[in-house]
Amino acid sequence: MKKISTVGILSDSHDNMVALKKAVDLFNERETDLVIHAGDLVAPFTAQELKRLTSPLIITFGNNDGEVFGLSKVFEGQIHQPPHEVIVNDKRVLILHDPVHLESLKKSDSVDVIIYGHLHRIDIQHGRPMIISPGECGGWLTGKYTVAIWDTEKNDVEIVTL
């Protein structure tokens, strides 16, 4: 399996197609090896932009992703119920949307990185586990359109304003 050096992370895009286009363009320009969306795409038509990604995509459902059947169909094999665990290089990564159990999950020795959304705010915590919330891609609550790029080799996270 190819080593994953960079992971693009976004959440809470909430049907904002302009912001999604900018995020996809950024991830493609940076040649990310993987993109993770931590929920709240909202509608299946978001696939129009996300299908342009040149890297694999992993998505978890968010609380506003009500059209489960349609999203499951257009993102077949890419969208999952949270929490969803993936292995990135040798790191166990847990992807959720709602961080309601974040404090108890942080005490677990079984996960290296937790990625979440829902709160529409940036949250980067170094340590084990590393915590990454990219803020909101859609910009609806804060007026800020942000995504993250995780450098898995340096274990560092860059927040990018779209």
Image (spheres, rainbow, N blue to C red):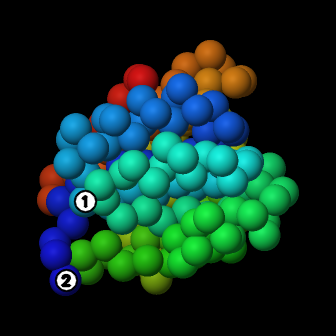
Between the C-alphas of marks 2 and 1, the distance is 12 Å
Q: Residue furthest top?
A: 143
The residue identified by callout 2 is 1
Give the image location of residue 2, x and y in percent: 16, 76
- The answer to whether 43 appears left or right of 6 in the picture is right
Q: Secondary structure beneath disc 2?
A: loop
Give the image location of residue 68, x and y in percent: 78, 66
Residue 98 visible in image: no
Residue at 42% over, 29% down:
22
Residue at 62% over, 64% down:
74
Residue at 54% over, 47% down:
48
- The answer to whether 158 appears left or right of 86 in the picture is left
Q: Residue furthest right?
A: 66
Give the image location of residue 105, x and y in percent: 59, 70
Quick one: 55 or 70, which is closer to the camera? 70
Depicted 13 relative to depicted 74: above or below: above
Residue 74 visible in image: yes
How crowded pointer 1 is (Cα within 10 Å; few <14, some 14-19, many 20+) is rated as some
- The answer to whether 37 appears left or right of 89 in the picture is right
Quick one: 20 or 133, which is closer to the camera? 20
How crowded pointer 2 is (Cα within 10 Å; few <14, some 14-19, many 20+) is rated as few
Q: What's under tag 2, amino acid-wise?
A: Met
Q: Earlier in the sequence, mark 2 or mark 1?
A: 2
Depicted 144 relative to depicted 21: above or below: above
Q: Secondary structure beneath disc 1?
A: loop
Q: Which circle marks residue 33 in the picture?
A: 1
